[in-house]
Image (cartoon, grey):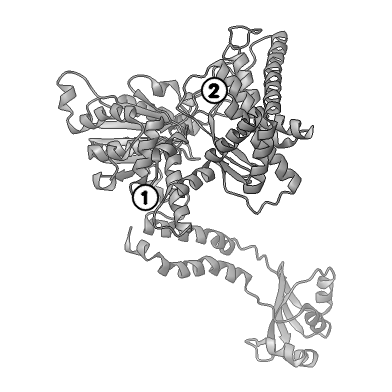
Amino acid sequence: MSGIGRHLNYWLLPAILLIWLPQLLLNAPQENLTYGDFKRLLQSGGVSSLAIRAADVEGEADAGRVASILSPGALKLLKASSQSAHYHFVSTRAEDPGLIGQLDAAHVDYRAIDDNHWLLPTLAVALPFFILLLLSGFTGRGTHPLGSFSEVGRSRARVYVQKDVPVQFTDVEGIDEAKQELVEVVQFLQDPQRYSRLGGHVPKGILIVGGPGTGKTLLARAVAGQAGVPFLSISGSEFVEMFVGIGAARVRDLFEQASRLAPCIIFVDELDALGKARGGAGPSSNEEREQTLNQLLVEMDGFASNCGVIVLAATNRPEVLDPALLRPGRFDRHIAIDRPDIRGRERILQLHARHLVMGAGVELASIAARTPGFAGAELANVVNEAALHAARENKNAVDMTDFEAALDRVIGGLEKRNRVMNDREKETVAYHEAGHALIAEARPNADRVSKISIIPRGIGALGFTQQRPTEDRYLLKRSELLDRIDVLLAGRAAEELVYGDVSTGAQDDLQKATEIARHMVTQFGMSPRVGEITFEGIGQPGYLNSPAAGDHAAYSEHTAQVVDEEIAQLLSAAHRRDLLTLRERRGTLEALALHLLRQETVDRDQLQQLMREHAREAAV
């Protein structure tokens, strides 16, 4: 940036004055005589000459007549003409059809003037833009939305060298398989002869696929830091602009820049913003984006395999990418990053907790067991929330209660203790959550309960029953799915048993239970009546939010009716099982609900003690 660019503040005030100067010139007030006084002068014969314009009249008036007609205050506004016996005046013109006739009768020398001057209004409009363009040239990046015109077609990639990328493979945990896949990339950049001597070559492009927060960008930065080569980072959306051709020019400039810096790494984040599959001329087509994608395909195809430039890209929507991007010779290798398992979660927690002042008794393994499905970014958030909670409590170290509070906040949302519920609603929530907890403990294949609370959290949750999985599961049996449906419907069954009525609080439970039942019938072949057949398209992986291409009904209306009947039968049977179990444990249900009303929160130890006491009572 130039010296003027570094001292832009010194030029700001003069620029504003120059921008507004034409407006001030155009709108400067000039009237020194009212139109009424002008008409009185005209009727008295005091006006000697007059120029008539569209907006005003300007002329000369006899000084003697002016002095006899105007007040002293109005007389002060006039200025003497070059003729000592006359005053020069200007008056705003009013709508006056009889003016010409009155001028002829008074024998006034008048003329009409066309004041449609284009220069000054044009200058008033154009000058601000010229000033802004001048400033943008001085600073290198002006206020134009595309920056300086000389940089429109240049790549916006940010270049990092080794000292700018402090991330190493040791800073990445929980995705060991993905790290191992990228070790070859680092070895090739550090020692290319190791592969070329046998005739092999490193993949030209590597596509990292994973859900949000799983560590795609972190892994790419670790490759650059480990290899110690320049790292060009850019987002896919930064290529596409509203002007056709700019994106393609930026792609060309990016690869030319990479060739000069080789060996190096190009990292394109959010590739789906650039590489969506090309379609027809429908409303979703975008000529500029398609031209940019075509240029990317050409550049990757033209890369020599030993030029020392490797393209890394990351996306969480691989299903929308153009097939031409995914073929061998462009993105040769695809690395899928799944959410970490329990051991990976524990290592990620240890990684993020190494900078904390940890108290005694913190069990990160327990926290890892209670966070199934959490990505690395979510686990980092749990650690940070625990540290913030300890700071709010003025503690000297982060202990287990801080992690418990952090988990409750991340999973359930922020506590809403100021949300006022009447006693009837609070009692209903207590019985609802007690029903969930008792059925979860009664079903052999359900996850054990770790905490029950009737404190409102988040946006709509009036309470929650938190379950702790015993292990990560990748396959579920029919009996396990049925137990999950039982737990989801247990809150509504408890309300019906106690009040003989139900509330709207089970809406989310019903939705989840119906979804499980539908999948059992239409996808998993778990309905004896429907048979071992799947009717709906298999859903995409968990990190893809878009529906699968085959997620439409591919069966007859009669089959659809059978499917609906089977789903209803699964849910009705679960409801009946819940009512039967809760009737048998009515005393425990009442005691647990009363305990929740008194303390608002019940942990696992308290729940087990309460269940043991009532089990002895039932035996007696």
Secondary element at tag 1: loop
Residue 309 or residue 525, whichever sits in front: 525
- The kind of residue on which mark 1 rests is Met
Secondary element at tag 2: loop
Residue 27 drawn at (x, y percent) = 63, 70
- The kind of residue on which mark 2 rests is Asn
Residue 180 drawn at (x, y percent) = 28, 28
| 206 in relation to 23, above or below | above
Residue beneath the point at 70% across and 23% down: 580
Residue 399 drawn at (x, y percent) = 42, 49
Q: Is residue 283 visible?
A: no
| 375 in relation to 554, above or below | below
Q: In this figure, which residue is indicated by the disc labeled 1?
A: 358
Local packing at callout 2 (Cα closer than 10 Å; few below 14, some 14-19, many 20+) is: some
Residue 445 — which label?
Answer: 2
Residue beneath the point at 67% across and 45% down: 597
- Left/right of residue 89 with respect to residue 249 in the rendered view: right
Quadrant position of the N terminus in the picture? bottom left
- Left/right of residue 62 with respect to residue 151 in the rendered view: right
